Amino acid sequence: MSIAALLIPDFALILFGFFLNRFTNWGREFWSGLEKLIYYVLFPALLFNSIARTKIDFGAATPALKTALVIVLVGIALAWLAKYLFKPEEKVFASGFQTAFRFNSYIGLAVAGRLHGEAGIAAFGIVIGLVVPMCNIASVWALARHAEANLFKELLQNPLILATIGGVLYSLSGLPLPETAQLLISRMGAASLACGLLCVGAALTFTGARRHASLIGYFTAVKLIAMPITALLAARAFGVSGVFFDMVILLAACPTATSAYILAVRMGGDGTVAAQSITVSTLCGMIALPVWLIISQQWVV
């Protein structure tokens, strides 16, 4: 089966989430509650279970982690150029800035599992465990003049980071997961993928997009064009191979994170700009992501 065909069910769930939100009266509170359940409980269970059950090949992971660092740093640098190229209002820039380099973990983990099963989820979890703090620091820093939160406290409490560290430590311990606990965590993890994609679709919005169209287009191009190109070049330079090669391409080509909107609003930014950038990135990513994964397959041949 082709990569494009493999991803159709995941993208269909995103669209289903959009229509559910549009044609039901469940309200934003329902989706916000579901997002919290996924982010704080279900997704960490998925990450921990996949990583804890995988024997980590640090020799193969190290080049991928170097590549991931380069990808994110290039994304941050190019996003920062928008401040001088478009000269937007500070609040508008800070809110959209983060959408140029952050990535949607819901989509990433779903696609990683689709491509390589638990090995893919584990590899993607290890990669994002390194770059999530970088992305969060850069995002909060840009919004810092509006912020009232403690950055380091938030990083230490980040459930994805904690789940990744916990999974790595458990894997290194060599201890088997008790069968009952493994079954429970596996079912929680399985629920997270479908629910996460539904929430991505529910977050899509099409209001007020024209005012900052050029800026949003630039941030989207950084995320879906510049970062994947960087990933291909850096992965080859660092000798990334196997499942980790697909994971760094996936990291780079994944649409931006829906949580960028939440951060922008919470820190006094422009939520409309963040929401529109997320929507454009997600819709364009439905085309860009399979294209880059197909290109990456040809790249390694």
Image: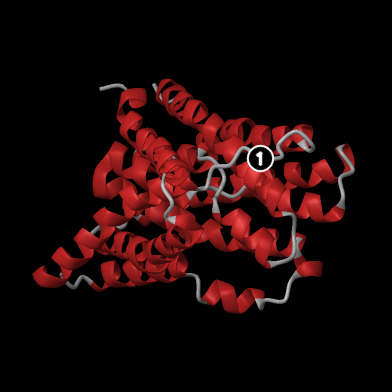
What is the secondary structure assignment of the residue under circle 1? loop
Return the x and y of residue 59 as percentages of the image width and height: 38, 52
Task: Give amino acid for label 1.
Answer: Thr
Q: Residue furthest left?
A: 179
Q: Quadrant of residue 259?
A: bottom right
Residue 81 lies in quadrant: top right
Q: Is residue 217 left or right of residue 93?
A: left
For residue 233, side relative to residue 296 (left or right): right
Which residue is located at x 62 percent, y 30 percent? 225
- Which residue is painted at 36% across and 39% down in the image? 13
Q: Nearer the viewer, residue 132 or 202?
A: 202
Task: Kindly indicate the quadrant of the structure image that contains residue 36.
Answer: bottom left
> In front here: 52 or 273?
273
Q: Which quadrant holds the C terminus?
A: top left
Image quadrant occupied by the N terminus: top left
- For label 1, the residue is 207
User: Does residue 206 appear in this view?
Assistant: yes
Q: How is the image coloured?
A: secondary structure
User: Is residue 76 in view from this perspective?
Assistant: no
Residue 299 locus on image (x, y percent): 46, 23
Residue 39 in the image: x percent, y percent? 43, 63
User: x%, y% of residue 284?
Assistant: 55, 30
State the residue in front, 247 or 235.
Answer: 247
Residue at image coords 78%, 32%: 214
Q: How many marks?
A: 1
Q: Residues within 10 Å of mark 1 (few under 14, many from 20)?
A: few
Q: Seen in the image, is 100 located left or right of residue 254? A: right
Give the residue at the far front of this rendering.
25
- Residue 237 vertical placement versus 161 (above, below): above
